[in-house]
Image (spheres, helix red, strand yellow):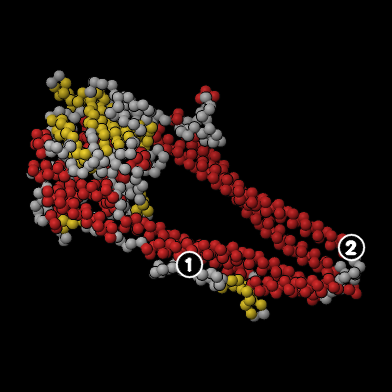
Amino acid sequence: MRLIVRAVRLRINTDDGALGRTIELSSGLNVIQAGNNRGKTQIVQGIIYALGMERMLSARAHAPLGSALTSEIIAERDGQEVTMPVASSWVAVELDNGMGEILTAQRYIKHPTFRPDLVRVWSEPAVTRQTPESRPTDYFLHSAGSVQGERGFHALLMRFLGWELPGVVDYAGKPVLLYPDVIFPFLIVDQQAWVSSGPRKVERYQIREPVRRAAEFLLRLEGPLARRRREELDRSINDLQIEWTSTLSALKGQASAIGGRIVGVPERPAGSVARTTFAQPTDLGGAMLQIVREGEWLPAEDLLRNLHAELNAAVAAIDAASQNGPTDTELRRQIDDVREELNDVLAAARLLEQDLTMAEAQLAALDRRIDGLQEERDRNRDIATLIRLGSETSAQHIADHNCPTCKQSLDSVESAELGPTLDVGETIGLLNAQLSTASAMRERSRIVAEQSANVYSAMQREIDHLRVQLRSLEGDAVTPNQIPKSGDIARRISAEIRRDEIQRAMDSFDIKQRSLIETAAAIAAARNELNALPAGLSESDLEVLRSVGSLMRQRLQASGFGSYAPSLVQIDVDSLQPVRQGFDVDTDASASDVVRIKLAYLDSIRQIGRERGTHPGLLVLDEPRQQDMELDDYEAVLRYLSEGHDGLSQVIVTSTTAMTHLRASLEGAGVLFVELGSERLLDWDARNDHLDR
């Protein structure tokens, strides 16, 4: 994506009339020439303000614009200067991202209704077009959600630029976003920033090394991407190790409960240790559940086969003893009663299984409902923020044309049929109430599901008990002279109980073993990917930095850098800023050479960054001819700033240098000159402006 400023418009309304001006720009080099105190700096400040980037200038939240746009303006009328209070004022910028999309952002500086952090946006050229074809959409700045929320202006601007802001860490080690106003000092240089060779360092967000992080992003270096991926993989491996330990602990607990143990499963899977060079997934082919019997540890499968054999022998002995024997009537009735009760409990258990499945589905549905309500509430909170800032979108806050309660489409419903509607505050209250209700329902459902699970476990124990009781009664249902041996009955009951508990343990072991195999594979894959990542800057990154440094030195040579040999100025691989080994370039070079370094560095970042990085190709320079830079050197700077645009990038320069010199030196370079001369930027403007509110 690219960022081209097509036009900037400033407007002031007073009781005596309106003042303003529109500056139309193009791709390539644009030179805005005006005398001192004529207002050219207000153009740069207006761009900064309209884009919501004023906090890159100062930690304080205030407009960077002067008194002419905020309190009172001096203008000429009938040959005399008059001072008038400002009733309202605004700035608008028209942007092009090079992908066929145009965006116009208007932001009020002073207004009786609209707060400064409200931005009105058109998806069309609303400055250069006499009458926009669409209504504006309101967005907000400098509040929670302005960078990531649906109605946050910086979130919109990042989408327009095609930027996905990376995560970085602050001084406390917490992850934060690389906010756009940390990046924009590489794109816009205000007149107060020429005292250092590097871009402004924005410390408002307490980001570690903010200038380096911004340069890494604009140049799309692999090292930072690898570092962030390394951090993600480290967290993933740690989480997987915790999951492994938890699953293994549960397995050991179940095995211990039946006198067993788990073998063939290590405490830490392959790849979980940081020094591992290459990890094969932990082999769990030998993992098994073993159970001790008569002092010998046997595989659970072998013991289960032995129990089946013992059970078959016991059943055969009992059947042989009770064959053809008369049965006591009362005992038979008891057997029938127990069998009937067992069938009833089995049927109830099957129904409860269905209820548990439905309860899980209900919990999942409630979770989805809660997520949807939270998303809807967040959207309405954004709208509430806009209304607080003066937006008029309260009647249109159901942007998706769906009922926020039942989610049915309202497209076919006439507005007159809707009846009374809720305002945004009432809608948020309704959504909060629904969230509270849904959360309470989920908690009740969770408790009911938990209770049902406990009842189901109790039913399983009751089923085991009834089965034992039934077999005991069946053993008693023989005549005295045909009573089977008590040892046969005891062995049968014991074998059945033991068989059932071992079978349940084996089923659980199989499920958890599959989970461990998946976890082991995930850990090994994460460790191997982590080991393959480059440590620090890759060779490709170093080549990029060498390209930036080489181009920077060419520009220094061309612009008359003379404090020392330009070859001594390098790009530091740690700070990614210009350095001279062993010296501070900001104090070791002359003041004008510090300006030359800054210009060469930022333009080199622009050129290399737009070729292989995420740099949008925009560079705005407010009066770069600082510290008595020689005219020839300044013209050389403008010449290299005019090179290599191909309609895909833009440099905007404000200047007090006489236009005759500039036109002569830049003839044939495809430069757009905007000459204000001695005129004030803000002059009487009698036309009715369609952007005025």
- Tags 1 and 2 in contact by the CB under 8 Å rule? no
Label 1, secondary structure: give it. loop
Residue named by callout 2: 330
x, y percentage for residue 158? Answer: 34, 42
The answer to whether residue 426 is visible is: no
Given residues 40 and 143, the one toward you in this image is 40
Mark 1 or mark 2: which is in front?
1
Left or right, residue 139 beside residue 505: left
Amino acid type, label 1: Pro
Q: Quadrant of residue 618?
A: top left
Direction bottom: furthest residue: 295
3D distance between C-alphas at marks 1 and 2: 63 Å
The x and y percentages for residue 456 are 68, 57
Q: Amino acid at mark 2?
A: Glu
Q: Which residue is mark 1?
A: 281
- For the N terminus, the image quarter is top left
- For image coordinates 27% across by 53% down, the residue present is 212
Q: Secondary structure at mark 2?
A: helix
Q: Give the crowd class for mark 2: few <14, some 14-19, many >=20 residues within 10 Å.
A: few
In the image, is residue 458 above or below residue 35?
below
Question: Would you say 690 lies left or right of 629 here?
Answer: right
